[in-house]
Amino acid sequence: MQHKLRIVITFLFVPLFFTSVYGYEIVENKLLEFQAYNNKVTIILFSPDGGILYAYGMSRTKAWDAQSGEFLGTVHSGKIHDQSNDGQFLLLRDDAGEILWSVADQSIVLTFLDSSGIGDAKFSPDNRHVYTAGSYHFEGDTLARAMIKIWDVETGELLNTNVRPPTKVGNIYEEIIPVSCEKIHLSPDEKFLSAIYGFWYELSPGVNVPMSYGELIDLDNWQSLHASDSLSSNCFSPDKKHWAAGTKIFDLETQTWGISLEGATEVFNYSPNGKYVLGRSSISDWGVIWDANTGQPIAAIPDPGPGSNSTAGAWSPDGSKVAIGGWDGTITVWDVSEFVESSVGEEAEVYGER
């Protein structure tokens, strides 16, 4: 009886709370819902043509038809990290390193041989390079170090290696040593790179606990522009001008912090036209869309079930739909066209570049 009562209260009260207090409108047009995995969905991506939905969870990369939800099969036993702008290739983690995977042939084209533990990988905006990030143990050194490498896509040749130096993070931590790089993003003009690192924090003598922090890097000189323990999620705007990190938006031209995303707890990515940000908030753990210019929430996507919360999200290439994955392995796709301006047409040509 208590369980039923809780559901009724949530249904009646929460939408009113969204609209009257926070100005949220509720997205109601759910197009798809399916059980992708038995636990956390880590990554979710639309193919550039919007036809395929890729996701990663439980050590498997899988694919679904983005219109019907039909399961298309397991792509690879490795983790999907990125896809080329034309959708012809995927970057997947393999035992030997990072692999370039042909979507058409369902085969490995090239392996970026790397003995370091790879945490993430991304194509450069022009698809000529691949950035890999991970951790590496130098010979004779017991402590791993965070490392970012750049590879040639045509030959697989290693072009550059950058070991991240010890860094002071805000006023909380003194100089710390990043031991792993777990996630990276590249700005659309390849001028900046954001990274999430892991490090060991000495809680008490002899007791070390794993912690993380984020960093914005200027790729011209590999200098850190900003480091903080509050940057666990971040994304670059398609117009190359902004960086949404944590709960705020950073102006890349003036290198100053601007507006805050009201109630944000995590950001997933910008819409293709750069006008909106998708993430989750203290009000809706499943999904929220913010106006990127004002930081105000304009739509809330309701949880598909009690106790659910989102772990990954993606916009469709035309900006009319969002896909969200959760802790329970559920993936839902929603039509958000009534809340946002479409990216179809001239705007798609302007902002559609990665």
Image (cartoon, rainbow, N blue to C red):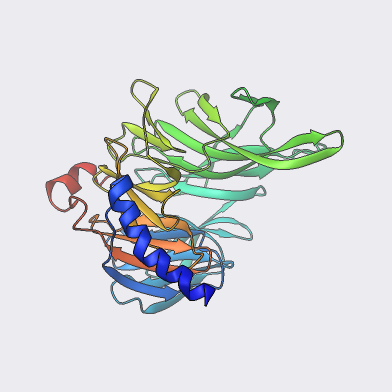
Asked whether residue 62 is in view, the answer is no
Give the image location of residue 350, x and y in percent: 19, 42
Give the total number of marks visible in the rendering. 0
**The C terminus sits in image quarter:** top left
Taking the spot 59% from the left edge, 49% from the top edge, the residue there is 119
Residue 270: image quadrant is: top left
Give the image location of residue 341, x and y in percent: 18, 50
Taking the spot 32% from the left edge, 37% from the top edge, the residue there is 295
Residue 162: image quadrant is: top right
Asked whether residue 41 is in view, the answer is yes
Taking the spot 35% from the left edge, 65% from the top edge, the residue there is 12
Relative placement, left or right, of 141 versus 151 is right
Give the image location of residue 81, x and y in percent: 48, 55
User: As displayed, is residue 345 above or below residue 166?
Assistant: below
Give the image location of residue 325, x and y in percent: 45, 63
User: As displayed, is residue 351 above or below residue 9?
Assistant: above
Which residue is at the front of the view, 29 or 97?
A: 29
Which residue is at the front of the view, 29 or 17?
A: 17
Which residue occupies the extreme left position in the image?
346
Which residue is at the front of the view, 83 or 21?
A: 21
Which residue is at the front of the view, 115 or 218?
A: 218
Relative placement, left or right, of 45 versus 50 is right
Relative placement, left or right, of 52 versus 3 is left
